[in-house]
Amino acid sequence: MCELFGFSGIREAGVEDGLRSFAEHSDRNPHGWGLAYYGSGVPVIKKKAIEARKSPEYYHAIRLARSDIIITHIRHASCGKINEANCHPFYQPYLGKHWAFAHNGHVDGVARHPRTQGETDSESVFNVLLDNVGRYRHLDNGTSYNGIARGVASLFDDYEFGRQVGLNFVMSDGNAIYTFNHHTDKPMFYAYEDHGVTVSTQKLDGYEWEPMPADRLLLLKKGHICEISDKI
């Protein structure tokens, strides 16, 4: 079952120790890794379709990653071939922003979106959320919070989310992180530290973790949780 990691920093920082600990969970998620971090609003994205612990490129990438926004994913393939195109985070330029998205779970029956380039349900879910960002951008002022919340609600309306179907995600537009937890078997956690806030599907060493509220969209910006939605 895939794992997610997201970091929102008060300032540009590295999280190499946390991401080394994160890689220890890749023995159960051996089908690839991906890393996105932002500079000047544009993500640097690194991916390999091999186990993170066995990838020298992973350890090189996490040493270089310094940003106030970092997203990392290790993959257990539930659909789609084992290749870089199907590794998270996915990237889309949309409405003048540069979006990155990583997902844990499986959404049965989601239609392949026209902008999807790989084979995963996750990438199509990403594009459904972006469509809602566009549809409801008149409701937002400086963030895309309302559009993403409406997108999550539309997914719940259109698809059945049972025990084995999950919608955990971390996404960013280069300005903020948006994160959501809906997965019976895979809760998410958050931890504050001196240089920011981290979210993860694993309680990594060196952090003091709190459970992330389920079924609520969180907005993280500059090292703080700025918004928590009502239950969606």
Image (cartoon, grey):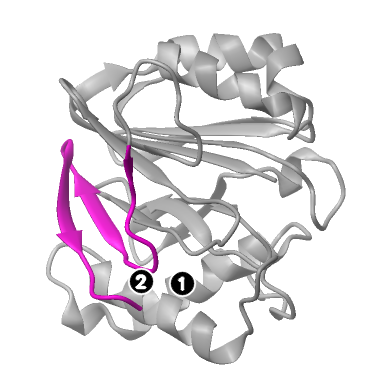
Q: Disc 2 on helix, strand or loop?
A: helix
Furthest residue to the right? Answer: 81
Residue labelled with disc 2: 148
Earlier residue among tags 2 and 1: 1
Say if 2 sits above or below 228 in the image. Answer: above
Please give the name of the residue rendered at 39% of the width and 69% of the height, measured from the top-left corner.
Answer: 215
Start-end of magenta stretch: 210-232
Figure quadrant of residue 208: top left
Figure quadrant of residue 189: top left
Kind of residue sitting beneath label 2: Ile
| Position in image of residue 191 (x %, y %) | 28, 33
Count of marks, rendered view: 2
Kind of residue sitting beneath label 1: Leu
| Position in image of residue 38 (x %, y %) | 36, 34
Please give the name of the residue rendered at 64% of the width and 61% of the height, measured from the top-left corner.
Answer: 122
Q: Is residue 110 left or right of residue 171?
A: right
